Image (cartoon, grey):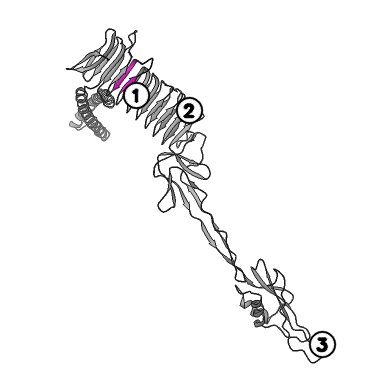
């Protein structure tokens, strides 16, 4: 085999002539180059009447040098008929390999934090939504994967296979709480949580931890999973989680929504709190609180507190002063009210959701009645005009609209009255739970159990309040 680019002589010698100067036949050199991806001839012209080269001679020269693939036989035949001397003529070309294509991932979720206010559809800017978190749900598609393409191998003119560079799989690794779809074409989330991508690994975090205050630098924080705040929650901000929430600092004039348990280690001031699970808080002052489970705090001041289970203040302070507490089960504390007579309302034995609906209906019904009263004079006038045939087309449309509104409001009023009556009956018949005060219950404290009400008029020590024979009875707390 000749070296790449080196000619190989395959001289074809004919019979020497009778004279003293022997004729010189035409000669062919086979040139193999470009890593055997091409082969050709360099022809040397005959002299002294030497013989010409034939197509068979040229083909035989290629065969001797191992050139067997992708030969241009037409070019060889043409070259034999019309030889070109001292010029390289390519007669075989290899097949270049086609490299594969790497696999890719097209993400269906945002992979980078925005870190800037969100532009709303109406053109306004939400300065509290900085897009720091990408929330996902269980089963949600995180990305679609395109598999790699292997490519096609090449072939040299000598028949050697040239390996292509195969495509690599998509450079992505499945991290915690992610999985492949059944056909392997999609990445799915296994849980409700926060999408995370570090440039290589895809994962979904169950708990998002913020190691600073929630303020204007973070905007509102909303996660599908759990949330841990190492700092405080500042005024005007909202934190929300589908799971539990833990806040190390104070929640001040903010909004908290927890789909699970809530632990406010620093307490809450002037905030709105909605907790679907149990709530534990150092203190609650001037807040609106709802909990689907138990509430535990050191003290509660001037707040509206609702719990579907029990409420207990504990520790050295352990007091409830001012506001309203509506609890389905028991209320326990050391001090109720204050020596200054601040009105402190406690209601037990009733579902706070039902109590809230009762209040809502009680506010709604008078408003509906006023709307009906305001429509009746107009309806009366329009109907009188209709009776005497003086109703114009415009007033006819007015009569139809007023009649429709009157009928709709009447139906809504009737339904609201019926629902309120049912709620009153249900609340009247629920007479469970106790209020337990191990210290002093001051005047100004009002205890409601079912339909019975007790107003504390003098200091009561170590007292429990419970329902008995249609009244709120008083006993010992121990």
| Closer-to-camera residue (365/35) | 35
Give the Cα separation between the discs numbered 3 and 1. 122 Å
Residue bearing the label numbered 1: 295
Residue bearing the label numbered 2: 230
Residue 34 image position (x, y, % from top left)? 67, 66
Residue contact between numbered discs 2 and 1, judged by CB atoms under 8 Å:
no
Q: Which residue appears farthest toward the bottom when viewing the image?
A: 18
Residue 373 image position (x, y, % from top left)? 23, 24
Instruction: Work out which quarter of the rendered image holds the C terminus and state it.
Output: top left
Give the Cα separation between the discs numbered 3 and 2. 105 Å
| Closer-to-camera residue (2/13) | 2
**Precedes in sequence: disc 2 or disc 1:** 2
Which quarter of the figure has residue 57?
A: bottom right
Q: Which mark is residue 51?
A: none
Which quarter of the figure has residue 397?
A: top left
Given this view, does label 3 or label 2 mark the residue nearer the observer? 2
Q: Residues within 10 Å of mark 1 (few under 14, many from 20)?
A: many
Which quarter of the figure has residue 395?
A: top left
Tell me which segment is drawn in magenta.
309-328
Residue 323 drawn in magenta:
yes
Q: Is residue 100 above or below residue 325?
A: below
User: Which residue is located at x 62 percent, y 71 percent?
Assistant: 158
Q: Residues within 10 Å of mark 2 (few under 14, many from 20)?
A: some
Residue 396 image position (x, y, % from top left)? 24, 34
Q: Is residue 443 above or below residue 144?
A: above
Residue bearing the label numbered 3: 21
Magenta stretch: dominant secondary structure: strand
Q: Residues within 10 Å of mark 3 (few under 14, many from 20)?
A: few
Give the Cα separation between the discs numbered 2 and 1. 22 Å
């Amino acid at each position: 085999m000749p070296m790449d680019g080196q000619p190989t002589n395959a001289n074809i010698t004919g019979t020497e002539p009778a004279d003293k100067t022997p004729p010189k036949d035409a000669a062919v050199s086979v040139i193999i180059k470009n890593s055997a991806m091409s082969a050709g001839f360099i022809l040397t012209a005959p002299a002294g009447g030497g013989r010409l080269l034939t197509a068979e001679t040229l083909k035989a020269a290629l065969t001797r040098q191992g050139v067997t693939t992708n030969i241009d036989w037409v070019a060889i035949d043409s070259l034999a008929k019309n030889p070109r001397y001292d010029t390289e003529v390519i007669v075989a070309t290899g097949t270049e390999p086609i490299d594969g294509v790497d696999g890719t991932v097209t993400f269906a979720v945002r992979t980078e934090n925005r870190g800037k206010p969100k532009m709303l559809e109406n053109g306004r800017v939400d300065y509290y939504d900085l897009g720091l978190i990408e929330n996902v749900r269980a089963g949600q598609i995180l990305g679609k994967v395109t598999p790699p393409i292997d490519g096609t191998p090449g072939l040299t003119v000598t028949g050697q296979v040239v390996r292509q560079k195969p495509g690599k799989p998509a450079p992505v690794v499945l991290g915690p709480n992610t999985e492949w779809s059944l056909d392997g074409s999609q990445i799915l989330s296994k849980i409700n949580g926060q999408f995370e991508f570090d440039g290589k690994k895809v994962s979904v975090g169950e708990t998002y931890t913020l190691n600073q205050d929630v303020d204007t630098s973070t905007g509102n924080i909303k996660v599908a999973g759990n949330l841990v705040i190492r700092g405080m929650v500042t005024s005007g901000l909202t934190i929300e989680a589908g799971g539990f929430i833990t806040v190390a600092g104070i929640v001040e004039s903010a909004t908290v929504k927890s789909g699970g348990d809530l632990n406010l280690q620093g307490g809450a001031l002037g905030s709105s709190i909605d907790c679907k699970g149990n709530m534990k808080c150092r203190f609650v002052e001037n807040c609106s609180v709802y909990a689907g489970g138990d509430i535990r705090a050191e003290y509660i001041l001037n707040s509206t507190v609702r719990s579907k289970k029990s409420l207990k203040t504990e520790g050295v302070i352990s007091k409830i002063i001012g506001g309203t507490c509506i609890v389905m089960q028991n209320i326990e504390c050391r001090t109720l009210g204050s020596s200054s007579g601040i009105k402190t309302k406690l209601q037990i034995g009733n579902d706070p959701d039902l109590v809230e609906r009762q209040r809502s209906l009680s506010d709604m019904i008078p408003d509906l009645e006023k709307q009906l009263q305001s429509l009746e004079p107009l309806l009366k006038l329009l109907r009188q005009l209709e009776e005497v045939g003086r109703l114009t087309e415009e007033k006819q449309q007015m009569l139809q609209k007023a009649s429709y509104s009157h009928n709709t409001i009447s139906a809504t009023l009737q339904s609201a009255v019926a629902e309120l009556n049912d709620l009153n009956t249900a609340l009247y018949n629920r007479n469970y739970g106790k209020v337990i005060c191990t210290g002093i219950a001051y005047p100004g404290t009002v205890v409601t159990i079912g339909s019975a009400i007790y107003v504390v008029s003098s200091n009561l020590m170590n007292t429990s309040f419970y329902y008995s024979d249609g009244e709120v009875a008083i006993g010992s707390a121990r």
